[in-house]
Image (cartoon, rainbow, N blue to C red):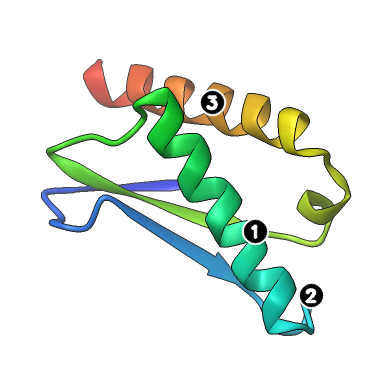
Amino acid sequence: MFYIIGDSDKLRVSLSKKNFKLAVDRNKIKRQIKEVFRTNGLYTDDGCFVLMVYKQFKELKYEEASVEIIKAVKSANNLIQT
């Protein structure tokens, strides 16, 4: 995960076609990540989160993935604020 300060986008998700062959899988993961951000209010106004998703993410259940995303975003927010 990266954070870009001053970017107008709120979220960018990068999935490799090498790791996720089917577009259906790539789109499903992107929708899940966007839903986690929306339901937990993780978007920020002053920057953009860039998530790079790897093959292990597909093995996680939705609840496990959302917990991991929330932890990563909150730790990134703590680094940004200090």
Q: Name the N-terminal-most of marks 1 and 3.
A: 1
Discs 1, 3 touching: Cβ within 8 Å:
no
Q: Residues within 10 Å of mark 1 (few under 14, many from 20)?
A: some
Q: Residue at x 82, y 38 (%)?
A: 61
Which type of secondary structure does the marked residue at label 3 adopt?
Answer: helix
Name the residue at 79% across, 84% down.
21
Specify the amino acid type for callout 3.
Ile
Which numbered circle lies on residue 56?
none
Q: Percent position (x, y) of residue 40?
A: 43, 24
What residue is rendered at 14% in x and 37% in y?
45
The reply, left or right, for residue 55 in relation to residue 69 is: right
Q: In the picture, which quadrant includes the C terminus?
A: top left
Q: Which marked residue is nearer to the observer: mark 1 or mark 3?
A: 1
- Kind of residue indicated by mark 1: Ile
Left or right? Give the position of 29 relative to 1: right
Name the spot of residue 56 as percent of width and height, x first: 83, 53
- Residue drawn at 44 percent across, 29 percent down: 39
Up/down of 74 relative to 49, above or below = above
Instruction: Tell me the residue that label 1 is attached to.
Output: 29
Q: Give yes or no for contact between labels 1 and 2 (Cβ–Cβ under 8 Å).
A: no
What kind of residue is marked 2?
A: Asn
Residue where numbered disc 2 is placed: 19
Distance from label 2 to label 3 (Cα)? Answer: 23 Å
Tell me which numbered mark, 1 or 2, is placed earlier along the sequence: 2
Q: Which mark is residue 70?
A: 3
* Dot 2: element: loop
Q: Position of residue 49 (x, y in %)?
A: 36, 47
